[in-house]
């Protein structure tokens, strides 16, 4: 028979055990919390403290050297300041950044895609025009990081949409591998031959609806007259014009003619579409010149079979020559709440320094925004051609649109492919959205 | 007899197909994790040339998944312990203790179950920042506790509702206080439900990305699922490495499912029947 004191002890022991589990967990957690904390936005005005940078690239093996160089360059000038690069998952990046902006608490510097993604968040960024110094002349691609003629971010890479092609696939189809199509008519002839030889003419992944962005900006220079192109970028967009209609009709027709791999609306662009092209399962692809799906990533698999060409001309009477659509790709903006804007701007300058950008180009394959970088050392012909086209380039058509119109265009492009809407219905909806 | 066999087949075939649809992605991930990047690009669906754990090892060593795993263990253990303590107490109160506004308060808890986290994300982030709990373990533990407590309370209340009131009354007659009844009667009797709820909450916390991503802003405090998600850059094209990271993150979850299948099923169905 247990004694009363034994009961009391059992009672206490039970309670101690019950309380100990969460208490221990919290104590261990608190120990962790007591460790030095990374406080975003803690750059001190004295040139000491910490700067936090959010991006989606610093975790990549290919960009390690670029970030190390930028960091060492900055810390040589500011030895007392810590720099922390936080690589965020890209698919959550703008949600996370949006929350930080709403709460006015987050990183000192953020990476942005040029165009709509940056412009939508310009109110949370510091205007940089009076802080750029020599960057202004050394870098190109500023338009993508401006809103209402004010600069909010510094371009680090350029983004463009060249047409890459696989010479081996052309050869197999009985075509001249060194003569890519110069007109849409030639492209249609080539596609028929490639399809006959058992390959997809183009690789496409439209699961997220991104395909139409590439299609519009990719084919645009060969369809729009120069004046019409400039008007579009300036905000004077006529969605009912024959040229715009032609692009959307071509989008529908190319799918109906069997240009693409099967099930494009259920194929992810990144990375399935580009993996198909790298794996030799398509003749052409509208790719990028920065981040991925570019000359370097394709060259790894296709080697000398990789070719590149500019947008084919649709109507030679209307368009005499074509160009590479390109603009600022990714860049860095300084958040409004940073405690020391000058210090943050110094870090942005280090991130955009020639030495750092050179590493970005050589190791990661991104075409840098720094025009002083010598790209001749790269022995990939496609890269040389792309770089030679840059001086004549004009910004992309799709990034001139708002995020809302782009989202609508994504959805409508999928419905066009599946035959649920007509081209006229699509253009009516887009015109209404783009006001 | 033959009819019973036929009926069994009618049920078994769809179930087998469902099992296949569940198992195939796991096998596909395992196969991809065994491939080199080149092998994957040239043919995503072919079998791996040879068995290798190189991608798993790379994901573990070069991406700091070890540190992230430790973080996940700390916050998951802390949050689950707190959830079980608070959830069982509230469940006992809602099911066995009579007080004014009990039903309304319980409805408020149920209502909290229906609010998606995305809706409260900004105020939540702001409040956590104001009390200096951003980027701390207690911050994430409390965030998980707040997020999953309504579910825990609902399940524990459902379970304790099935315990006859006479048991509590008998303990009261013997001189037990409210806390005494909770400790001597409710906790021991609630062990199966606590186990089920604990496992489910552990899975919720372990698999979470969004809350952890918001709260833990520095890399050293990152949890495993966020770390794995971050293995993908904007358009990272090293899918085999990513698959290796996914395997690292999935192994504990699969192990928990295998060991505690029955408890998980019991937990999911708790409260679905009465009596």
Image (cartoon, rainbow, N blue to C red):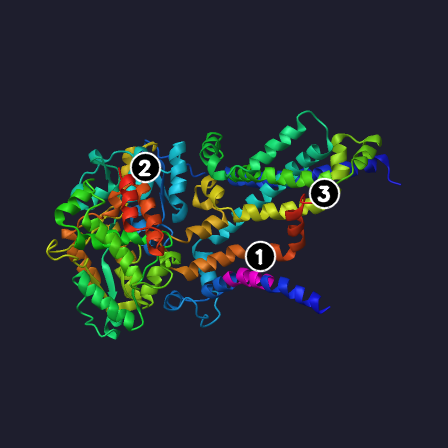
**Quadrant in which residue A290 is drawn:** bottom left
Q: Earlier in the sequence, mark 1 or mark 3?
A: 1
Residue B21 shown in magenta: yes
Residue A165 visible in the current orientation: yes
Of residues A219 and A300, which is closer to you in this image?
A219
| Res. A76 visible in picture | no
Mark 3 surroundings: few (<14), some (14-19) or many (≥20) residues within 10 A? few
Q: CA distance from mark 2 to mark 1?
A: 41 Å
| Local secondary structure at mark 3 | loop
- Residue drawn at (68%, 40%), measured in percent from left and top? B158
Identity of the residue furthest to the right in this view: A1
Q: Which mark is residue B274?
A: 3
| In the foreground, B163 or A70 | B163
Q: Are marks 1 and 3 in contact (CB under 8 Å)?
A: no
Discs 1 and 3 carry the same chain letter: yes
- Helix, strand or loop at label 2? It is loop
The numbered mark at residue B254 is 1
Q: Residue most toward the top?
A: B100
Instruction: Say which quadrant the N terminus of chain B sits in.
Output: bottom right
Q: CA distance from mark 2 to mark 3?
A: 52 Å
Between disc 1 and disc 3, the foreground one is 3
Magenta part of the protein: which range?
A: B15-25
Picture residue at 32% right of the left edge, 59% below the top: A204
Q: Residue at x 18, y 59 (%)?
A: A312
Neighbor class of circle 1 (other Cα within 10 Å; few <14, some 14-19, many 20+) is few
Q: Nearer the viewer, mark 2 or mark 3?
A: 3
Q: Which residue is mark 2?
A: A121
Whole-percent x and y of residue A206?
35, 55
């Amino acid at each position: 028979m247990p004694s009363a004191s034994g009961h009391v002890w059992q009672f206490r022991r039970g309670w101690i055990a019950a309380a100990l589990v969460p208490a221990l967990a919290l104590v261990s957690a608190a120990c962790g919390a007591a460790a030095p904390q990374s406080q975003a936005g803690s750059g001190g005005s004295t040139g000491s403290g910490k700067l936090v940078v959010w991006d989606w690239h610093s975790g990549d093996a290919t960009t390690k050297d670029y970030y190390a160089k930028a960091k060492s360059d900055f810390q040589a000038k500011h030895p007392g300041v810590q720099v922390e690069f936080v690589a965020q998952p890209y698919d959550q990046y703008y949600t996370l950044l949006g929350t930080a902006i709403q709460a006015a608490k987050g990183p000192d510097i953020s990476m942005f895609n040029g165009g709509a993604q940056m412009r939508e968040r310009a109110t949370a960024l510091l205007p940089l025009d009076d802080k750029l110094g020599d960057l202004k002349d050394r870098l190109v691609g500023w338009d993508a990081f401006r809103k209402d003629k004010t600069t909010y971010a510094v371009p680090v890479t350029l983004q463009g949409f060249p047409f890459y092609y696989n010479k081996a696939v052309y050869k197999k189809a009985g075509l001249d591998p060194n003569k890519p199509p110069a007109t849409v008519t030639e492209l249609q002839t080539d596609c028929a031959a490639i399809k006959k030889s058992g390959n997809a003419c183009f690789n496409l992944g439209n699961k997220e609806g991104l395909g139409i962005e590439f299609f519009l900006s990719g084919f645009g220079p060969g369809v729009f007259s120069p004046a019409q192109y400039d008007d579009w970028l300036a905000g004077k967009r006529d969605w009912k014009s024959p040229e715009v209609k032609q692009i959307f009709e071509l989008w529908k027709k190319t799918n109906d003619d069997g240009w693409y791999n099967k099930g494009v609306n259920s194929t992810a662009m990144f990375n399935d579409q580009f993996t198909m092209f790298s794996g030799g399962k398509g003749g052409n692809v509208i790719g990028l010149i920065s981040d991925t799906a570019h000359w370097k990533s394709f060259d790894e698999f296709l080697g000398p079979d990789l070719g590149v060409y500019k947008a084919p001309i649709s109507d030679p009477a209307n368009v005499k020559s074509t160009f590479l659509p390109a603009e600022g790709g990714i860049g860095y903006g300084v958040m409004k709440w940073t405690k020391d804007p000058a210090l943050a701007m110094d870090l942005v300058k280090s991130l955009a320094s020639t030495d750092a950008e050179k590493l970005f180009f050589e190791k990661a394959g991104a075409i840098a925004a720094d025009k002083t970088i010598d790209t001749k050392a790269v022995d990939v012909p496609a890269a040389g051609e792309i770089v030679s086209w840059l001086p004549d380039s004009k910004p992309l058509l799709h990034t001139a649109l708002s995020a809302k119109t782009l989202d609508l265009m994504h959805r409508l492009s999928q419905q066009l492919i599946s035959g649920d809407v007509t081209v006229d219905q699509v253009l009516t909806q887009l015109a209404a959205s783009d006001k | 007899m033959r009819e019973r066999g036929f009926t069994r087949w009618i049920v078994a075939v769809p179930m087998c197909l469902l099992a296949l649809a569940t198992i195939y992605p796991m096998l596909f991930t395992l196969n991809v994790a065994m491939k080199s990047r080149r092998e994957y690009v040239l043919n995503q669906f072919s079998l791996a040339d040879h068995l290798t754990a190189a991608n798993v090892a790379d994901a573990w060593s070069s991406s700091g998944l070890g540190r992230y795993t430790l973080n996940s263990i700390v916050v998951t253990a802390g949050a689950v312990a707190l959830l079980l303590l608070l959830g069982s107490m509230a469940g006992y109160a809602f099911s066995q203790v009579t007080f004014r506004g009990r039903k309304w308060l319980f409805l408020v808890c149920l209502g909290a179950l229906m609010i998606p986290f995305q809706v409260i994300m900004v105020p939540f982030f702001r409040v956590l920042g104001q009390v200096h709990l951003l980027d701390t373990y207690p911050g994430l533990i409390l965030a998980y506790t707040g997020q999953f407590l309504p579910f825990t309370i609902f399940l524990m209340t459902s379970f304790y509702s099935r315990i006859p009131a006479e048991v509590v009354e008998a303990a009261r007659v013997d001189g037990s206080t409210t806390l005494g009844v909770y400790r001597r009667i409710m906790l021991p009797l609630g062990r199966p439900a606590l186990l089920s709820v604990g496992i489910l909450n552990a899975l919720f916390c372990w698999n979470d990305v969004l809350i952890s991503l918001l709260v833990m802003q520095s890399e050293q405090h990152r949890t495993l699922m966020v770390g794995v998600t971050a293995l993908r850059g904007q358009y990272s094209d090293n899918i085999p490495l990513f698959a290796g990271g996914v395997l690292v993150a999935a192994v504990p979850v699969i192990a928990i499912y295998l060991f505690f299948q029955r408890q998980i099923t019991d937990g999911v169905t708790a409260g679905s029947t009465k009596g």
